Amino acid sequence: MQGKVVVITGASSGIGKALACHYASKGSKVMLAARSGDKLKEICDDIKKSGGEAAYCITDVTSENDCKGLMISAVERYGKIDVLINNAGISMQALFNDAEIKVIKSVMNINFWGTVYCTKYALPHILKTKGSIVGVSSIAGLVGLPARTGYSASKFAMRGFLETLRVENLKTGVHVLMSYPGFTASNIRNTALTADGSVQGESPRDEGKMMTAEEVAAHIYNAVKKRKRTLILTTEGKLTAYISKFFPALMDKLVYNHMAKEPDSPLK
């Protein structure tokens, strides 16, 4: 990936930040996108101090114009785009019966439409380089997680969109990777939305027992390098994919029981 230009959304924290640092350490030129300019500047400064190349563009992925501007900035700065990593995302925790519709829309706008907008304006450049488009999904994109209706819906939508894009580009040389991290130690649960759209705050899970964002970033990097089509991380994730395929009714019960054990779970 030496010299490759990599655009990463949601790069101000968690998996996105880890991806930025990992790619930069391997000699890639990274263009970072998120809403927090201060955090992006700090990450870029750290990368540059370590001898890497990095730039940033303040981007709200729910804005089509922002996503278009991000790709323009990347090409103006580095002359091309080799890899787009659609990582920006937000979660939620509420039963659908309790959740306000605005919460579902907010999650869809970031997770799904952000991916569509960024991919739309990056694709012409990635076609030229025969590069890669990556979707950072979740186990919630493989099975429906209760109390995560909007989140699962957005990740299933991302999966359908990018898998179709892969088929459309079978003869163009464009590579599409769908990655499915398991529960990862990041701030996505801290920023998750509740039933009324307020921020959840404290994570309901023990982050210390999860795969780190840095480990996830390394796996995604290697999967892009090898041009894999699918990446499912953690033993729990792989078991989920297997059981849901061959024993779907059993999977429903297992998922329900697992999610019901979360502190403050709305499941009875």
Image: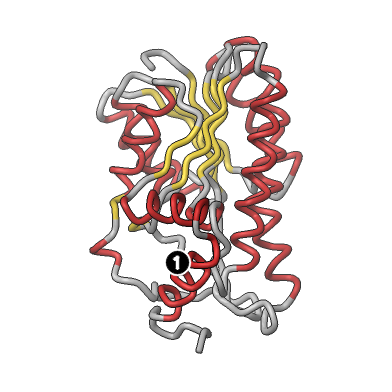
Position of 199 relative to 31 (above/below): below
Q: Name the element at disc 1.
A: loop
- For the residue pair 101 and 55, the one nearer the viewer reads as 101
Image quarter of the N terminus: top left
Image coords of residue 106 (percent x, y): 69, 62
Instruction: Report the residue at 75% width, 73% height from top.
Output: 101
User: 158 above or below 92?
Assistant: above
Residue located at (29% from left, 53% from top):
211
Q: Is residue 45 in view from this perspective?
A: no
Q: Residue furthest front?
A: 246
Number of callouts? 1
- Left or right: 52, with 230 as reference point: left
Q: Position of residue 184 (x, y in %)?
A: 36, 56
Residue 83: percent from the left, percent from the top? 52, 24
Residue 168 makes an appearance in the image: yes
Quadrant of the rendered image containing residue 92: bottom right
Q: Amino acid at mark 1?
A: Arg
The residue positioned 49% from the left and 36% from the top of the image is 32
Residue for badge 1: 189
Looking at the picture, the colour scheme in use is secondary structure
